[in-house]
Amino acid sequence: MLMALGMFVFETRSVPYQQLQRRTEWRHPSQSRVGERPAYQFVGVGSDTITLSGTLYPEFTGGRSNLDQIRDMADKGKAWPLVEGSGRQYGLFVVTGIDETSSAMFRDGAPAKIEFSMTLEHVDDQAGAAAMGDITLYSQAVLQGAYA
């Protein structure tokens, strides 16, 4: 297992990302001053964004249906715990975007290659807990074959 977002597991059979990029920001608004450099004040943490990207080869890895599972999770507007395979816990994240490019099409129009990039945003863990996705319902759907 590379990582899990809620009950969705990123692994070779599903969506094996090849790159994880993380950007963390802190807020320091400035105030202009006459004859001086601007004054800055720390007002708190800013956004924490994780971008996962990679290439899927549906004959060997996951494909469009796996990306659609993540889209279904994003459609709910809920926050999901993000946990690395090593056990590192990142906190609660929402899916804010998925880019998908299909190429090398088979005769039936199915892609042999899918390049993807998805953006996850960290939400306030306490406030996000109230909006957390229902892992129980998702796992029941998986067991019933809704995401097979």
Image (cartoon, rainbow, N blue to C red):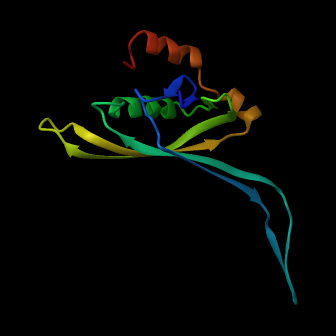
Q: Can you say whether 148 is above or below 103 in the image?
A: above
Q: Quadrant of residue 148?
A: top left
Q: Using the rendered image of the protein, determine whether residue 59 is visible from the camera's viewpoint.
A: yes
Residue 64 in the image: state x and y as whole percent. 33, 34
Q: How many marks?
A: 0
Q: Is residue 80 left or right of residue 55?
A: right
In this view, the residue in front, 110 or 40, is: 110
Q: Left or right: where does residue 78 sit relative to residue 15?
A: right
Where residue 61 appears, as percent x and y from the top left, is 35, 31
- 119 left or right, relative to 103: right
Outermost residue to the left: 107
Rendering quarter of residue 33: bottom right
Q: Nearer the viewer, residue 43 or 1?
A: 1
Name the residue rendered at 30%, 33% in the picture: 58
Q: Taking the image as drawn, is residue 33 in sight?
A: no
Residue 83 point in image, percent of width and height: 63, 30
Residue in the picture at 66% in, 34% down? 92
Relative to residue 82, is residue 110 drawn left or right? Answer: left
Question: Residue 50, image x and y in percent?
Answer: 59, 46
Furthest toward the bottom, the residue is 35
Residue beneath the point at 58% across and 26% down: 6
